[in-house]
Amino acid sequence: MTLRKEARAGMPRGVRLVLQLLGFVVGLALVAWCIRGALEGGEAGWEKFKEADPGLIAAMIGCSLASVIANGAIFFATIRPVHREGFMVLQGVNLVSSLLNYAPIRLGVMSRYFYHVRVDRFSILFVTGWIVVVGITVVAVMGAAVGATFLQPQPGMAWALMFLAPLIGLILALPILARLPLVRRFTRGGEAMLTNRGWIATAFSLRAFDLGMWAIRLGIAASILGIDLPTGDVLLLAITALVVSLNPLGRLGWREAAVAILAAQLAAPGLGTSELDATFKQLALLESAAEASITIPLGVVALVWWIRKVRARRSTPSTANADS
């Protein structure tokens, strides 16, 4: 099945493009709103940032690097039961995808399709199923974390048990569910990736680690700016930032606005002073900048490699794309 034919099954290409361009414009407006608000009435926050321990800044950047590596490893773990793709190859593809998500239209997912179809000779259906399986790790881990946090706001042993219980149940159930026609409809040829419980558990663990890195990065940013947030609130902010950053309308602006608004509601519900608002916008921008400091430079380097690989192509087609 060709790319053109499969594209017709979903939203028209022109509509998707217009929506993404509108999303990018709105995202720019949201970034401008955050920056303007961060500069107004937030002098104390900037002073705290200037006086911050360099070790804390380095720790935030380290969390960003660990998060990027974990995301690439999730793609490695999910495809491992059906295909032996190189670990560093998937790190490079993931970095390029992360970089291109800053573009006016979300080119990140498109770059994954382009690379794996052209270089690995995977079918579009296979790549779609792969991405759906990766999406399952996001929904499962984020859902378990949100549920556990609402039931037990303060992380501890009880929180851990409530977080792990649904994930363990899902790990046990997925190989069985993968045989259902409804699941096959959405995984689109990638259901075989759900049958190996060991690699499913690895993917879930990596996603949980990734969420932990987001939470630690946000917690450090809040500490630098002197914002006192309970651990449970930091975790909810991390979940929000991670999920919103995946929205189809664009990476830029939406996540920063979501973090600033939710942080204000969690830390000071009903209090709307300009100084507080400025501090929460500074929090959102600082956390986002820590990620960009890794994603953009490493993504640019990976993009050079990506272009060379795509141009060179692989002469031997993969056997993993039998479903076309």
Image (spheres, rainbow, N blue to C red):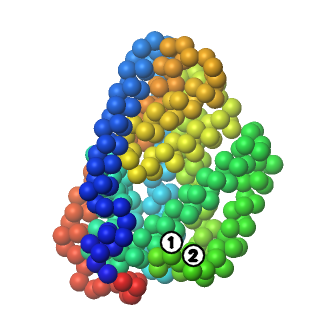
Q: Which mark is residue 146?
A: none
- Residue 238, image quadrant: top right
- Res. 216 in view: no
Tell me the CA gap for discs 1 and 2.
7 Å
User: On screen, 216 above or below 183?
Assistant: above
Image quarter of the C terminus: bottom left
Which residue in the structure is indicated by mark 1? 186
* Residue 27 image offset from top left, x and y in percent: 36, 37
Residue name at image x 48 percent, y 19 percent: 278
- Residue 153 appears in the rendering: yes
47 over 138 or under it: above or below = above
In percent of width and height, residue 289 lies at: 40, 36
Q: Secondary structure at mark 1?
A: helix
Name the amino acid type tagged 1.
Answer: Phe
Residue 195: x and y in percent read: 60, 79
> Of residues 264 and 212, which is closer to you in this image?
264
| Mark seen at residue 182 | 2
